[in-house]
Structure formats: structure tokens, C-alpha cells
Amino acid sequence: MEAHSGQQSFESYAKGQREAILASVAKTGTWRGVHQVLAVHGLEIKPHGAGLVIKSKNGAHAIKASSLDRSLSKSRLEKQLGPYQMPDASFANIHATTVYEAKPLHRDPERGSLYAEYQGGIAKRKASLASLNARDATAREHLAREWERKRKELEAMALTTRDRFRLLRQARQFEIESRKRLAKNMTKKRKEICEEVPFTSWASFLRTKAAQGNEVALAILRSRNAVVGAERDVQSDKPKTFEQRQAARLPWFERQREIREANGVNSMQKKELAAIARMHQLAAMEKASGSGRIFKDFSCRIDAKGTVLFTLASGGLVRDAGDQIFFSAHDKAAQDVALKLAQAKWGKAINLEGNSVQRERQQGLMKQREKERNPEAGWER
């Protein structure tokens, strides 16, 4: 669930509260005390089948109690506290100090405004779909009543049995067609709502924003394990004053201008993020120079980790993961594209190793860290 959505799962949240819960449960000797401890953490424990489950306060998420800790299994708790007892109504008023909210796992400090936008979009999508479902249910009920009335009218007519049967069969067919038209119309409206808000999870929202050219969204996708900054062209790692940073950005601003004015790059492509824009820039430069066409007819997409994937006309694959660029092994065209893309991104200080390209400084740093972890490795080499 976490890999798919980029948000904390309920099980992960519950296990994060485990130590505090177990310490408090150990001090109490009653079911009432257990219910109170869990309520403070926005949880509750209830029977389910032959065992117990721990649920969120709103009841939308649940895990087996024993999966949180074996000491919370039904047999052990009943051995310690006696038969299970339901919480009374007073527990509904206990103020929870923390509740499960499916928070994003990404660590980027700039995620706040984007997460607010995501929550607003999800709320809008849910409200629109709920309203549409209500209208659909009302329309179906109206349709059922209308055709029931028409059938009764046919049955009340002075007709032969054969004619009545024929007319009722036709009415039934017309009713089925009416229901199909209603279902088709509702499906169309649902599709429009889903197109207006095309994401259902935090990760899919970030992919949508990244595909629209939002560099911060792409950086957040890549920040699952560590904070990653929005992508920029190669710059010195030394601290810079504001004026120096502005001067360092000028070459990229110039390249953006070149892309905006380049032939063969449409308006939608110009809005795409830097990694894709670089590919289009290289393709336009290649076309203008009349050289080989390794960039011709490439396609691109963004995966859940923020990696930009380029599929070449030759069938080769190039993956821009931010700090490294990977390409299909034994594919000369993919290797050439990866090298040109790396040079456009980092300059000439790049290192090719196997089927990946990265900044020379990054490669040197990795070798230095490896040497520090294993000092004798250098002698073996």
C-alpha cells in the first residue's frame, strides 16, 4: 500500500504506537483500561471472527491485534483480563492525542503546499462522485417507478392474453434500453470527474504534477529515503551568494528560451519538466544539424519513484533517476542518448560505468565511501 500510494499505511501507523500502547496496557488490569489506552491513540479493539482486531477510530482501517504484538491476541488478553468486554458510550468522548491520517512518506520540506492541493483535489473528487452516485440512485428509482406504472396500465387494458404479453415484453425491452442509456450517461459523467481530478493517491498526484512540469513534485517523488532538491543544471557544490546562484542559473534560462523558440517542439512539450525538455531540446538540435536521428520518435512517462523513462524508436530504454541515468545494456543508440542527456544535464564531467552514467564527482564520492568502508579493497584491485 505504501509503495503504491506513497502514504503511510494503517499497520505502519499502529506499529509506530506499539511501545507506548504496550507500556500502558501492562499497567492496566481491566478491559476498560485497554480501551482507554487505545482510544488515546485513536484506536479501538473489537472481536472479529475467532480473534480480535485493532481498528482506527472511524473504523475504516483494521489489522489483527496479534500482528501489532502477540501479547494482544484474544487468548492472551482474555487469560489476563477475563472475557472480552465492549467499551461503553463514554469512550467516544475521549480526546485522541494522535490519529491515523495516511500522511505522505516523502520527506521533502516543500511538500506542504502540494499536499494541501492534493487533499483539496481528493475532497473535490469524493464530493463530486458522491453527488453523482446520489443522482444516479434517484434516477434509477424514478425509472423503476415509471416503468412499473406503465406495466400496470398495460395489465389493466382490455387486451387478449397474447397482445398483453407482447406489449409487456416490448415494455420490458424499452425499460432495459432506458437503464442502459442512464448507465452510459452516468459512466460518462464519472469519467469526466476522474479526468478533472486524475489522481487517487499522493503518489499518483505527484506523478501527475511532475508530468505537467512541476520540478518540486518530481523531487518529492525522489525523496522517499532522503530529501532531494528540485533538479537543476550542474553547479558547484560550494556555498553561493544570491548573485552567484542567479548567475549559475542563467545558462539554463537561456536553454529554456532556446526550447521555447525551437522548431519541432510543440507547446505542450515546452511545459514538461526539465528532464523531458532536455530530450526535446536534444532532438530539435539533432534535427537542425541534420545528424543521425537517435532521438527521433521517443516517448516518455514517469513512474512512482519519480524516474523519467524514455523509450526510443530503436526499442531501447533510458531512465533518468535524477542522480544517475541508466540505459538498456548492449543498445548503442540508448547509450549514445544517455551520454548526450548526461552532458546536457551535468556537462562533460560525467562517468560511464556499465549501463549507467553519473556525474564524475558523484562517482568519485561513491568510490571514496567504499574505500572508507573497506580500506583493503584498494589493495585487491
Image (cartoon, rainbow, N blue to C red):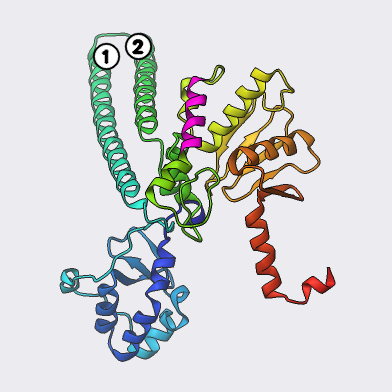
Q: Nearer the viewer, residue 127 or 236?
A: 236
| Quarter occupied by residue 214 | top left
Q: Main secondary structure of the magenta part?
A: helix
Q: Is residue 273 left or right of residue 318?
A: left
Can you say which quadrant of the picture contains the C terminus? bottom right
Q: Residue at x 42, y 60 (%)?
A: 8
At mark 1, the secondary structure is helix
The magenta region covers 250-261
Reply yes or no: does residue 19 show up in magenta. no
Check the image and report above or below for 150 versus 212.
above
- The residue drawn where x is 36% and y is 35% is 197
Is 104 on the left or on the right of 324, as rendered?
Answer: left
Examine the structure image and report whether residue 255 is included in the region drawn in magenta: yes
Seen in the picture, residue 23 relative to 154 is either above or below; the reply is below
**Is 233 on the left or on the right of 220, as rendered?**
right
Between 177 and 239, the one lying in front of the other is 239
The residue that mark 2 highlights is: 167
Q: For the image shown, how many numbered marks are present on the structure?
A: 2
The Cα atoms of the two marked residues, 2 and 1, are separated by: 7 Å
Which residue does the numbered mark 1 point to in the structure image?
154
Picture coordinates of residue 84, whole percent (x, y)? 32, 80
In the rendered image, the vertical position of residue 235 relative to residue 211, given as above or below = below
